[in-house]
């Protein structure tokens, strides 16, 4: 029994002597990263101008409501969300104005029923656009966009509208063609747009079927 005990003890000492020592220069996994010798950039340090830096100009913009004068017409209410300043010929520095019918609207919060479209300048009517809804009353505009649809250098108007009830309405869209003097529209061609609800869809359809609209 004594001989066995001595042998086990000697074996344990030998095994311990073979374990390599860990270098003290190797950081442990829990060492804080802030102890590493890395320089951090200064916070809020001002940038020094040089010969290649240029100042960015400040651009001031005005809203459409501020650019166009309020419009008053008997029996009508101006729809400011669908009234826009124009920058294309021959209507530059004028305003596209949407008016709704007070008779067709149930109250001020109702959709702009009886929508009609006009060009104004300095509060005076310049052009009244033709009827977009082919004689149907209680129709209203959902949105408009100004695009040169037939690439003739003149900006046309795409109008997306609706008729009937606010909850069960159907699309009623129109294209106003810029003739260089006023705007025209083709009611038969507009009927081909009756299944489209988005301005982008109307625009794409007209560009593919220009013979019907121009």
Image (cartoon, rainbow, N blue to C red):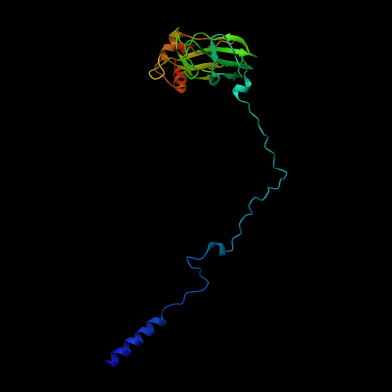
Using the image as rendered, state which of residue 52 and residue 201 is in the foreground. 201
Residue 166, percent from left and from top: 41, 18
Residue 174, percent from left and from top: 47, 14
Q: Is residue 22 above or below residue 115?
A: below
Q: Give the farthest residue toward the bottom.
A: 2
| Left or right: 16 as drawn, with respect to 92 | left
| Left or right: 159 as drawn, with respect to 64 | left
Q: Give the farthest residue toward the top.
A: 135
Q: Is residue 205 visible?
A: yes
Q: Is residue 90 visible?
A: no
| Residue 94, picture quadrant | top right
For the point 32% across and 88% down, which residue is it? 7
Q: Is residue 26 above or below residue 59?
A: below
Question: Is the N terminus in the top left, top right, bottom left or bottom right quadrant?
Answer: bottom left
Using the image as rendered, state which of residue 104 and residue 84 is in the foreground. 104
Using the image as rendered, state which of residue 197 and residue 120 is in the foreground. 120
């Amino acid at each position: 029994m004594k001989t066995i005990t001595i042998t086990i003890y000697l074996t344990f000492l030998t095994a311990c002597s073979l374990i390599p020592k860990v270098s003290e220069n190797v950081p442990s996994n829990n060492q804080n990263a802030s102890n590493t010798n890395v320089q951090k950039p200064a916070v809020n340090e001002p940038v020094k101008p040089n010969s290649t830096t240029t100042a960015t100009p400040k651009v001031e913009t005005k809203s459409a409501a501020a650019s166009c004068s309020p419009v008053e017409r008997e029996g009508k209410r101006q729809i400011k969300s669908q009234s826009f300043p124009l920058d294309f010929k021959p209507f530059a520095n004028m305003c596209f104005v949407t008016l709704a019918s007070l008779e067709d609207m149930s109250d001020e919060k109702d959709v702009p029923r009886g929508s009609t479209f006009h060009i104004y300048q300095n509060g005076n009517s310049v052009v009244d656009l033709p009827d977009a809804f082919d004689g149907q009353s209680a129709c209203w505009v959902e949105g408009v966009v100004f695009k040169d649809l037939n690439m003739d250098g003149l900006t046309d108007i795409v109008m997306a509208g609706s008729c009937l009830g606010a909850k069960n309405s159907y699309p009623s869209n129109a294209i106003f063609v810029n003739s260089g003097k006023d705007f025209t529209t083709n009611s038969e061609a507009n009927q081909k747009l009756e299944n489209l609800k988005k301005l982008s869809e109307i625009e794409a359809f007209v560009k593919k079927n220009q013979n019907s609209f121009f």
